[in-house]
Amino acid sequence: MRSFSTLCTLGLLFGIPLSSIAQQQTEFSGTVQTDAGEPLPGATVFLKGTYLGSTTNSAGNFRLLVPGTMLPAPLMVSFVGYESAMDTLSITGRPLFIILQPSAALINEVVVSASRVEENILRAPVTVDKLNAQHLARLSTPDLVMGLARQKGVDVTSSGLLMASASTRGFSGATSERLVQLVDMMDTQSPSLNINPGNALGLPEVDMASVEVLHGPSSALYGANAFNGVVLTTSKDPFQHPGLSVRLRGGTRSYLDGQLRYARRLGQRWALKLTGSYATGQEWIAATYDPLTAAYAPGNNAQGSGLGYDAVNRYGDVGTTFGPTGGALNGKTVFMPGWTEREIIDGDDKAMLYRIVPSLHFLVTDKVKAMVEFKRAQGTTAYQFTNRYRLSNFATNQFRAELKSDRWFVLAYQTQDFGKNSYDLPFTGSFIQTQKDPRSEAGLSYAQQYFGAYALAYNTFLANPANAGNTAGAEQAARAQAAPFQLTAGSPEFNEARSRVVNDATPGVGSRINPSSLLNDVSGQYDYQSKLVNAVVGGASRQYRLGSDGMLFSDQDGKRIINDEFGAYLQLSKELLQNRLKLTAAGRVDDSKNFKPVFSPRGSAVFAFDKAKTHNLRASYNQAYRTPTQQGQYLSLDLSRVLLLGNISNGFQGYSTAVAGSLGSILSNPATAQETLDTYALNADRLKPERVATWEIGYKGLVVPNVVLDLNYYRSSYQDFIGQVRLISNIDGSRPTPAQLAAAATGARPLQTGPTRVIQVQANAAQQVHASGSMASLTYTPRKQLNLTGNYTLSLLERKRLPERFQAYYNTPRHKFNLGAYGEVGKAFNYSLNYRWAEGHLFESPFAAGELKAYSSLDAQVGYHLSKYHTTVQAGGTNLANTTNIQVYGGPQISRLAYLGLTVELK
């Protein structure tokens, strides 16, 4: 890690040419105002194509030093919500007076993500949304990603107060495997978990210049896993945005959030920036006590059964199936009751996140900037995927070095994560139960004694002729007799047993997970512009170095798993018909260690119906691919009831888990056993990348003054679709023989130990999977005092073609919508309001699957600006009506969160 960052830093420093020596400067000053004659504080003023710039002060004034050799030079002035203006700086150094006109519904926004170069949002070839600084200031959620749910076509799932995941075009979940989340073109994923943990490795909102959401396949420009979209956050440049910003919030659920940004120019060439944040609050606790389905817990009983049952959010529901020695319990499965999530975390119910981001910037020339940056993020929150986890003090370090101009960049960064004190909640409960009871002279575990006492009392009760057939009475008597062997949450014995488990990383004994993996990435891009054609060419090299000491990955030998990826792309664009028609073609080739090279093409056309280009029709065809996640390739996690494995060897052969309940009768007839078993045969071939081809057509334009309409329809066809398959197989991937099945099906824990197990792996579907959808958004901005927004999303998945028991993890409501309003009243008061609703739907994950009810949230914020003190006082909240808002099956209710706060801006 140290050598990597040192190398990048030296590379930048050695690149400093002699031209960086200070030149003779000419000073310019000026004023920026609105069309009503009001000053515009915070407007950005900079020389086009350079990093020379400044911002206006509270009176709308600015001053700028420009090398004399650059004059005359074009000066760009911009402010969110207004038309950008351009003036020319001359040698005379005359004072400037610039008036900005209000922008009609923000139709002049510039986006970068759609084509990796700047372009007007109306002319983007694919569907893209942008949140500017004003939009970001209106968000009332505790995490940026949660706030993205206001956008059309964006699905957000929250599994903790500071843990949220975003997706577009369906296939949502508690992890965003199909969407790439970038900050200044750096991937924010955790190398070990292959997820973007909310905005933990992102930026505090006070340092965000903009956030763009790119919908749909984007591998042609962004490579692997930009499968359903990209979220690109751009930070504020310290040369263009110097000053001090402080944001403080405090509210219900012991919520506290403090953010700071300080940026300062050091002379004409150097600048430093320091950004930091700290947030904490009472965690949302999952509390779903439905029984796990048979696919997740074979032999599970119905809710309320006197034999016990394995509940979704009760951890430690250890089960055993009795054989003939169990007497009247022969063939029945008894579950020892576990503990709720709140009991298992034992007071560890505070979510927390802090970030520290110092950076140093240097203008090599007026058009070339070098910078180095370090980012430290550490937090505690809930996380859900293969199981439900408590990420306790989970930390990430990121080092970045970059050299860039307005036409090209070279970027290198390294990300390393640390599990710290994180632990698995279901494992914690199970391993407490299977610990040896210090009171037992025979050295038996709590579970062994519980089941022994249960069986004795059950059979004793039924042995009494007066109780014949009274199984309910037997179950009640058995539970009472076994209860002393169930530890009471919060008792000294429970606390001691829990402490031993959560602090022990030994597989099968402790629940602590402490992965520490690295991601190294080097990329570059060049933008070539000419009258004939514009071209963008770039490439990237990435290396994963996975480490978990066998607790998460198949690195039981203690050596890191190395996985390399490479890619290069080219995009060509041309404008025709007096620049009303824009044609773009792009393609990217990617190669990786475990899979063959893949090619991702994209073609698009944008046509403007009018000379002003306010009515634009777009059409595109995209192919993209998704490399299986690092966990999909190298996972090795034993959940007892199921063994999760990576699938890059020779695949797995076995039988459907549907056969589990019939194994006894099938194997009792050896002559026909194999023939009958063959009817349940199920295979999971070696993984390969998933492909998607998407056609999209859309319109975006100013339909009438102050009304912007954005419509689109898409249809996607997925080949080699990656989903989850559960089957009964041997650990080495071979198909079990009847004799192996017979051996595995006997004992107290059938199919939970030994070489024949219930195994879950990622696998490709042989059939094509089709998904389609449509989105519509309308923005009406008649005046500053009142602006209205609304969007609707329709999402469809054709499930009929999917194999039986194949889990697609679509996890997306068919219908959802947002309705909102925002505005500024007078010079001081501002407000925003948003109501979100989503239809109930099936939610699948490796942890649990079930139906979600319809969920909604009413979010609001009001602010009052005290210009004399450069301060805005705020009040706001999310889910203010406290309606049903469970977004992940097995996850928590996202209840009301209200706050008061203030923001201070000193330029």
Image: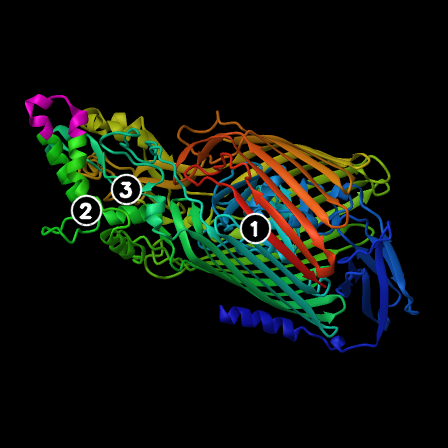
Q: Residues within 10 Å of mark 1 (few under 14, many from 20)?
A: many
- Indicate whether 417 appears above or below 127: below
Q: Amino acid at mark 1?
A: Asp
Q: Label 3 to label 2, Cα distance in Å?
A: 12 Å
Q: Which label was assigned to residue 446? A: 2
Q: Label 1 to label 2, Cα distance in Å?
A: 53 Å
**Badge 3 is on which residue?**
338
Q: Label 3 to label 1, Cα distance in Å?
A: 47 Å
Prevailing SS of the magenta stretch: helix
Q: Which label was assigned to residue 614? A: none
Q: Observer-nearest residue: 291 or 885?
A: 885
Q: Nearer the viewer, mark 1 or mark 2?
A: 2
First in sequence, mark 3 or 1: give its number: 3
Q: Amino acid at mark 3?
A: Gly
**Badge 1 is on which residue?**
590
Q: Element at badge 1? A: strand
Q: Element at badge 2? A: helix
Give the magenta-colored segment's residue range.
461-475
